[in-house]
Image: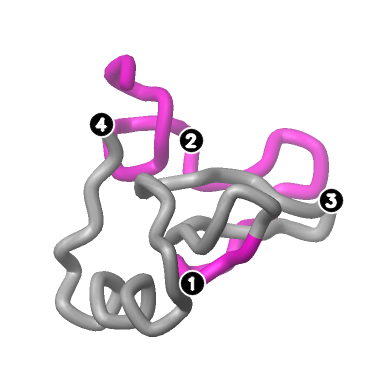
Amino acid sequence: MMPGETISTGARPQCEDCHNTSEFKVCRSPAGYYIGTYCDCGPYSRESDYYNTEEQAEEALKNKTFKRS
């Protein structure tokens, strides 16, 4: 991960198009569950690596232990 690539490492917290982002939340993609944000345009950032289960991702979000390598 490069500095500034995610919100947690310095990227803009707002979408340049809709000027909105949400709080970190558990998201799902075909690759698995992850911690990220959505804006009015759709998925905005992926702040973590992927988790195998929603429960693992929820726990990482709750405890603020998520990381992206």
Q: In front: mark 2 or mark 4?
A: 4
Examine the residues drawn in magenta and state their main secondary structure: loop
Q: What secondary structure is found at the residue carrying circle 1?
A: strand
Q: Residue 41 carries which label?
A: 3
In the rendered image, the vertical position of residue 19 relative to residue 32, given as above or below: above
Q: What secondary structure is found at the residue carrying circle 4?
A: loop
What is the C-alpha distance between the residues marked 4 and 3? 26 Å
Direction from residue 43 to residue 45 in the image, left or right: left
User: Residue 68's image quarter?
Assistant: top left
Direction from residue 61 to residue 52 in the image, left or right: right
Q: What secondary structure is found at the residue carrying circle 3?
A: loop
Q: In front: mark 2 or mark 1?
A: 1
In the rendered image, the vertical position of residue 15 relative to residue 66, given as above or below: above
Q: In front: mark 3 or mark 1?
A: 1
Q: Tell me what residue is drawn at x 24 percent, y 57 percent.
A: 66
The quadrant the C terminus occupies is: top left
Q: In front: mark 4 or mark 3?
A: 4
How many labels sit on residues?
4
Q: In front: mark 1 or mark 4?
A: 4
- Which residue type does callout 1 highlight? Lys
**Cβ atoms at labels 3 and 1 below 8 Å apart:** no
Residues shaded magenta:
1-28
- Which residue type does callout 4 highlight? Ser
In the rendered image, which residue does mark 4 sit on?
69
Give coordinates of residue 13: x percent, y percent: 49, 45
Give coordinates of residue 25: x percent, y percent: 48, 72
In the rendered image, which residue does mark 1 sit on?
25
- Name the residue nearer the viewer: 1 or 14: 1
- Which residue type does callout 3 highlight? Cys
Reply yes or no: does residue 69 show up in magenta.
Answer: no
Q: In front: mark 3 or mark 2?
A: 3
In the rendered image, which residue does mark 2 sit on?
12
